[in-house]
């Protein structure tokens, strides 16, 4: 099957004239992609092929950043190693590259890469004109910098301090470090020199805004609410002096503020800007600093608004609801956002009526245009009622009539499904399956109570929501329809395994990616970052219900459906030993009613094996497993240790199939 390229990790240059991303190849590898958005730089002047693609030698950890001089920076690093490789490449003129041209454009210039084995069509060129090895604990690329600087590099040292470096070329090097006494978040330019920046600097009382001058390292405090507890810089426009922040003015409510600098700095909270319903994130300002592109998210859906700063008036842009990545670029050629929908991968999209002069210039390397985006029907969402309230789910296809219904559970748990594009869910839809992706309790995007319902209770209220969901889906499908199937990743894998333990005969199959088996076990065996998340949520007391402690290893004997588990051997988030423990637990419980299971350790893969090299084959296997038919289990006897209600099957009343949902039906207040 010909797959559409997936694009991730979008970045824009300092003045948004160039953009870059990582793009998947047909075998799941990643290459760097690069756009000249306005088509004014050689070799792109009067050249319609303004997208270039490099060799498939990157990983999801690669940072890409285009420079204003027309180059592309890439920063490669292995997690936790402290070793990085910085590369600077330049696009090749059209017609001068001998490597095979891809469907997206012409490869970048440089010598052949080591990944080509010498058989079949040659891959795009490895594009490393200059390279530099860097030893640093943490390093990230930031657009901007003074004249003669390609970009900035922000290093976090072992002692918690920060160094801001200038990246220079010929030769490629880091120079002129400025040291700050704590960690920083954003670096937002305050003027056109590239020397003065606003940043949130960590101190004894948390993060506070400050201005930083790269010439001498001097710092000054920026205005923030005296009684506020939260302050984060969001966006700056150096030409107009615009600086937007997220601030708590002391009443506990987070709002967007406009900071006025100078001799009498102050904060203002525009009324109409703060009256928009949903979570508001400024994405980009126009070159004059007079208009701002806003992403406004409500649950699974997001809309794009254009905000007039002088009149405090937002208006919706001509794009349908979807998913807007938290990066955008606004140059003289117009506003470009990263837009996705369930049936369309993320890509650059131009927004009408945003160019400084004339019509918005097209994007030859983009998968589709603004007109295509406006006409693309997005998958609807649907709300499902539960005894505790209701939750929203993204829906692909008609789950009432489709031969296969996949219930997809997101990871996190501090996450939620959106109207963005998920390649696995899209493949399932293309294979004829309907997909229901719920944002059950514990999901973000629906208020504090909804998100914190699972604190101290992983697998309790969220599991109750999934049990209600499968009951609803089954009751509204034909009596002879196959039961729904389950798909879960990371935390969603944990929740999916609990669901097939709780209602063994309510599901047809279950596939999990990078699952864990219990919160307590994961805390003992995981990284400090994961332990910190679990400690922040709390372990809580074991629930007093029919399942007891939420430990899949203890409950594995209840699983009675075919199971597929995929786990990267180099997973830095959830150790692969979790899936190996699952395999051993399932093997121990094999009895008269054998449960087919396949638990695969993926060598060299991390937490997202489907997004890495070889992921295409794994995706094919996963989709084939989930959309395969299921044997007739209606005559299966009740296995030992399960109640008659558990062993009941689809042709019996649904209340018998699903047993009892007894614990924590209510969202804590």
Image (cartoon, grey):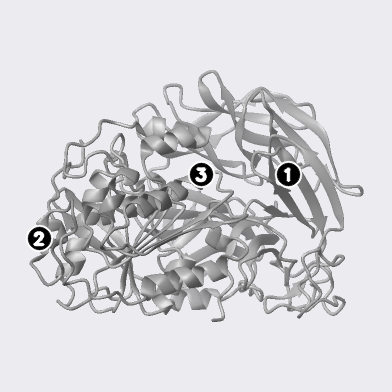
Local secondary structure at mark 1: loop
Tell me whether circle 2 and circle 3 mark residues in contact (CB < 8 Å).
no
Marks 3, 1: nearer the viewer: 3
Q: Quadrant of the C terminus?
A: top left
Residue closer to the observer: 281 or 611: 611
The reply, left or right, for residue 168 in relation to residue 7 is right
Q: Position of residue 343 (x, y in %)?
A: 44, 73
Q: Quadrant of residue 347?
A: bottom right
Q: Circle 1 sits on which residue?
A: 192
Asked which secondary structure carries label 3, the reply is loop
Residue 651 at what x, y percent from top left?
A: 12, 72
Question: Residue 232 — which label?
Answer: none
Query: Mark 3 sits on what residue?
Result: 575
Q: Earlier in the sequence, mark 2 or mark 1?
A: 1
Residue drawn at (26%, 38%) of the image: 549
Instruction: Quickly name the residue at label 2.
Output: 656
Q: Earlier in the sequence, mark 2 or mark 3?
A: 3
Q: Residue at x 66, y 74 (%)?
A: 365
Residue 161 relative to residue 610: left or right: right
Screen quadrant of the N terminus: bottom right
Residue 612 lies in what quarter of the image? bottom right
The image shows residue 349 at horizontal and vertical percentages of: 56, 68
């Amino acid at each position: 099957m010909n797959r559409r390229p997936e694009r991730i990790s979008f970045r824009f240059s300092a003045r948004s004239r160039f953009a870059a991303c990582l793009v998947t190849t047909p075998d799941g590898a990643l290459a760097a992609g690069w756009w000249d958005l306005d088509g004014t730089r050689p070799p792109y002047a009067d050249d319609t092929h303004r997208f270039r693609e490099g060799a498939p030698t990157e990983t999801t950890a690669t940072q890409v950043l285009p420079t204003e001089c027309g180059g592309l920076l890439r920063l490669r690093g292995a997690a936790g190693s402290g070793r990085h490789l910085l590369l600077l490449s330049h696009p090749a003129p059209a017609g001068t590259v001998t490597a095979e041209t891809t469907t997206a454009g012409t490869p970048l210039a440089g010598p052949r890469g080591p990944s080509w084995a010498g058989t079949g069509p040659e891959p795009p060129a490895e594009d490393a004109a200059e390279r530099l090895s860097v030893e640093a604990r943490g390093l990230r690329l930031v657009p901007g910098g003074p004249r003669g600087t390609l970009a900035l590099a922000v290093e976090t040292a072992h002692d918690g301090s920060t160094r801001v470096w200038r990246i220079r070329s010929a030769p490629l090097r880091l120079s002129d470090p400025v040291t700050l006494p704590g960690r920083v978040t954003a670096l937002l330019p305050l003027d056109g020199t590239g020397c003065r920046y606003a940043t949130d600097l960590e101190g004894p009382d948390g993060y506070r805004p400050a201005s930083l001058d790269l010439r001498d390292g001097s710092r000054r405090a920026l205005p923030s609410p005296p009684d506020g507890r939260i302050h984060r810089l969001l966006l700056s426009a150096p030409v107009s002096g615009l600086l937007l922040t997220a601030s708590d003015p002391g009443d506990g409510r987070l709002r967007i503020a406009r900071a006025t600098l100078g001799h009498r700095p102050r904060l203002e909270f525009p009324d109409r800007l703060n009256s928009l319903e949903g979570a508001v994130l400024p994405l980009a300002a126009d070159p004059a600093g007079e208009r701002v592109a806003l992403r406004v998210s409500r649950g699974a859906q997001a809309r794009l608004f254009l905000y007039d700063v002088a009149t405090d008036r937002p208006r919706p842009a001509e794009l349908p609801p979807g998913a807007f990545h938290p990066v955008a670029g606004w140059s003289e050629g117009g506003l470009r956002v990263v837009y996705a929908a369930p049936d369309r991968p993320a890509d650059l999209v131009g927004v009408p009526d945003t160019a400084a002069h004339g019509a918005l210039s097209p994007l030859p390397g983009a998968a589709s245009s603004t007109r295509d985006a406006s006409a693309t029907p997005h998958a609807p969402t649907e709300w499902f009622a539960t005894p505790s309230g209701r939750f929203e789910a993204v829906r692909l296809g008609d789950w009432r009539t489709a031969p296969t219904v996949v219930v997809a559970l997101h990871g996190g748990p501090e996450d939620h499904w959106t109207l963005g594009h998920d390649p696995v869910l899209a493949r399932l839809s293309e294979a004829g399956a309907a997909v229901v992706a719920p944002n059950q309790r514990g999901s973000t995007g629906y208020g504090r109570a909804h998100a914190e319902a699972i604190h101290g209770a992983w697998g309790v209220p969220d599991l109750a929501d999934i049990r209600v969901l499968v009951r609803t889906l089954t009751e509204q499908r034909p009596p002879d329809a196959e039961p729904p199937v389950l798909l879960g990743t990371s935390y969603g894998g944990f929740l999916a395994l609990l669901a097939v333990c709780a209602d063994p005969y309510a599901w047809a199959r279950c596939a999990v990616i990078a699952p864990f088996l219990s919160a307590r076990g994961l805390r003992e065996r995981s990284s400090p970052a994961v332990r910190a998340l679990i400690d922040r949520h709390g372990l809580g007391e074991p629930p007093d219900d029919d399942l007891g402690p939420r430990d899949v290893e203890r409950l594995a004997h209840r699983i009675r459906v075919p199971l597929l588990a995929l786990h990267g051997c180099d997973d830095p988030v959830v150790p692969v030993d979790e899936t190996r423990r699952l395999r051993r637990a399932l093997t121990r419980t094999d009895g008269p009613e054998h449960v087919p299971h396949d638990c695969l350790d993926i060598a060299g893969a991390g937490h997202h094996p489907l997004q890495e090299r070889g992921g295409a084959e794994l995706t094919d296997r996963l989709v084939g497993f989930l959309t395969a038919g299921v044997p007739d289990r209606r005559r299966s006897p009740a296995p030992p240790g399960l109640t008659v209600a558990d062993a009941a099957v689809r042709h019996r009343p649904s209340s018998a199939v699903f047993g009892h949902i007894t614990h924590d039906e209510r969202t804590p207040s």
